[in-house]
Amino acid sequence: MYRTDKRLVEENIFKTVMMLSCLGVIAIFLLMMATVIAKGAGGLSIKLLTTAPTGGYIAGAASGGILNAILGSVYLALGATFLAGLVAIPVSLFINVYLKKDSRLATFIRFSFDVLWGIPSIVYGAFGFMIMLFFHMRASLLAGIITIALLELPIMTRAADGVLKMVPLELKEVSLSLGATRFETAFRVIFKQALPGILTAVLIGFGRGIGDAAAVLLTTGYTDSLPTSLLRPAATLPLAIFFQLGTPFPEVQQMAYTSALVLMLIILAISILSRVLTKRMHKHILR
């Protein structure tokens, strides 16, 4: 009787802690959203989203818009996600199809990506800057894409790996027993079965890439011009927010909160798109 009461008390305590933690996370999210909306919604306009800056933020002339930063962020994240996906998805399939579940090589690969995931983004920026110096490159959109791709790689790989580990082992065995090669099993069976989860992993990487500032601070540069070349500097929304908030001019700081609102709306749209596509693809998944 005493043991039963003690277990119930422990359960209620941990249940309360979990509920308070969830409420805390929700409260922080709502407070952040409310702050950005309250300070940034007033400056949101069609002109802001469709024109590039003309006066320069450093001088305090907040004329024009943030189209350069929006396009730069989208180009940067799309290019980096594409490069990271070309490596992350095959590596995840290799671990789960070609290697045994508890092999030393699979364990080492997963451990390596876990370590890479934990490295601060500014370190990726410094590494990308070293690569630029080695190849005598200037700050450019291409350098930023490569740096962000390295940042997204461990995130996408481990997320996709977690999804692929949930695919039933029997599906793999049946495919091999019917005469399919490991390559055919990986891309025609396992990949299709885990496609909704892999898509989520790709979008997680995209969301991380479009919102990172430290990794592109040293590699992408910044410019008021629209991005027209991979070899030229490009503006991004995180850096636009960083530079705008650093000025003493209230009208420029107002634009920073509007830029933050636009960035949050883009990430929110990505999350909603991820859920919609995942729901539609789930009907093709074996249960």
Image (cartoon, helix red, strand yellow):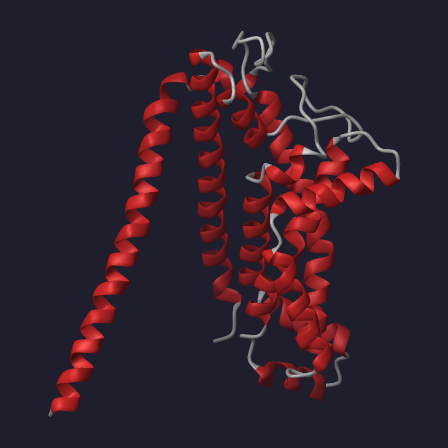
Q: Is residue 80 visible?
A: no
Q: In this view, does 5 lie above or below 148?
A: below
The answer to whether residue 47 is above or below residue 137 is above
Which residue is at 16% across, 88% downward? 4
Count of marks overlaid on the render: 0
Does 252 sit above or below residue 153?
above
Q: Quadrant of residue 50?
A: top right
Residue in view at x 17 percent, y 80 percent = 8
Q: Is residue 160 left or right of residue 13?
A: right
Image location (x, y in percent) of residue 164: 59, 71
Does residue 14 lie above or below 26 as drawn? below
Compared across the picture, whether 180 is left or right of 26 comes to right
Looking at the picture, tell me which residue is in the foreground, 43 or 168: 43
* Furthest residue in direction right, as rendered: 135
Query: In the rendered view of the protein, which quadrant contains the N terminus?
Result: bottom left
Q: Residue at x 57, y 57 (%)?
A: 201
The image shows residue 135 at horizontal and vertical percentages of 88, 38
Percent position (x, y) of residue 71?
62, 28
**Which residue is at the far left?**
1
Indicate the position of residue 45 as horizontal and vertical percent values: 44, 17
Report the front residue among 243 and 196: 243
Determine which quarter of the picture holds residue 5.
Answer: bottom left
As rendered, which of 250 and 49 lies closer to the eye? 250
Name the one closer to the observer, 177 or 68: 68
**Whether residue 223 can be seen here:** yes
The residue sitting at 74% across, 24% down in the picture is 228
